[in-house]
Amino acid sequence: MPAKKRTVRIGNWYKSDDEKVHFVRKRKAPRPAKLRKIVPGQVLILLAGRFQGKRVVFLKQLKSGLLLVTGPFKINGVPLKRVNSAYVIPTSTKVDVNGVNAGQVDDDYFKRTQAQRRKNEQGFWAKRGELTPEQQTAEKTRLEGKRKTQKSIDDALIAAVKKTALLKQYLGARFSIGKTTRPHELVF
Amino acid sequence: MVLGKFVEVGRVVKINYGPQEGKLATIVEILNDKRVLIDGPTTGVQRQVIPIRRLTLTKFNLKGATRGARTGVITKAIKKSDPFAQYAQTVAAKKVAKKALRAKLNDFDRFRVMILRKRRSALLSTQLKSLKKNTGGKAQAQAKGGNKKK
């Protein structure tokens, strides 16, 4: 008799009937994350990740609780990005963001598309990773749209940044600690 | 060594220990060889008895302070001739002020200070080079570029 082709993955744990569930989350919807005293337009120092030490401008808090920041991209290479507020030092420097409209950017903006997820497929699934022509054009337009949003937000920001002397250079520089700096005594 | 600063009525002192550390006051009365009565109505020091050990004598005197004078009299004397303002001109006082200012700098200020110091040092080195050249030192034609940054 030919072996049945397995379509469902076999696990190694089967729940019993009398198993007690110890933690039942009563609250179904996530609570909106509380924001420290961080104000739109404030310069933040990123503490982790690829852009650690970079000084970026805070735009708004997204529904997921993450902070939306931007370099601006032309100044320090940081694009529109979501950042966890725990990995951030807020400084007391503020940029005027009155002319900046980040309204259309939300968590969905950062969601990975099917094409993105499949992009690096290799071996057996390589065919799945190849994009059809429609998918390719879709990707192109998606990226174009992203560039446009980035540009529209950044242009307004850069205009505001240019008003203060040395602010552009400040945002372009990374924050670092030397041998004699005492972080606990620094005023940000 | 000539003894210059005396513990006397009117001597301006700096408190260097205790909750009032760093503040200035005037000696109003000498109680014994170890304690004095001080008062600093304009510097935020309450009239109090304090051991001399906690004080540093400055070279300034408050003119018009009489022994056991009340706070009002002291205030009037300070209005006439303010030794505390004179003390603020001294090098020691300026150093303290500078240190306090540096502690307050925020991240952007620290960055600006760094850039300005670099500019200043670039200017100085241009001057130095041109001076060396003029006095027949090394014939360096290139002066270091001044500040190219905005």
Image: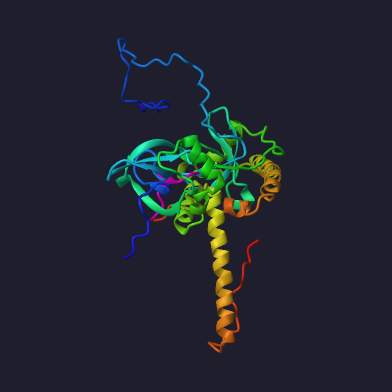
Residue that lies at the very extreme toward the left in this rendered image: B33
The residue stretch that appears in magenta: A180-188
- Report which quarter residue A147 is drawn in: top right
Is B125 part of what is drawn in magenta? no
Comparing A14 with A86, the one in front is: A86
- Residue A188 image point, x, y percent: 50, 44
Q: Residue at x 47, y 15 (%)?
A: A27
The total of numbered circles placed on residues is: 0
- Quick one: quadrant of the N terminus of chain B? bottom left
Rendered view: B60 above or below A31 = below
- Judging from the image, the colouring scheme is rainbow
- Residue B52 image point, x, y percent: 31, 45
- Report which quarter residue A58 is drawn in: top right
Comparing A120 with A170, the one in front is: A170
Residue that lies at the very extreme toward the bottom in this rendered image: B136
Magenta stretch, overall SS: loop
- Residue A169 image point, x, y percent: 60, 55
Whether residue A127 is visible here, answered yes or no, is no
Q: Residue at x 43, y 47 (%)?
A: B10
Comparing A8 with A154, the one in front is: A154
Is A42 on the left-hand or right-hand side of A20?
Answer: right
Residue that lies at the very extreme toward the top in this rendered image: A18
Rendered view: A25 above or below A55 = above
Q: Residue at x 61, y 32 (%)?
A: A106
- Residue B12 image point, x, y percent: 43, 49
Whether residue B149 is visible here, answered yes or no, is yes
- Quick one: quadrant of the C terminus of chain B? bottom right
Comparing A138 with B96, the one in front is: B96
- Report which quarter residue A92 is drawn in: top right
Q: Residue at x 50, y 50 (%)?
A: B83
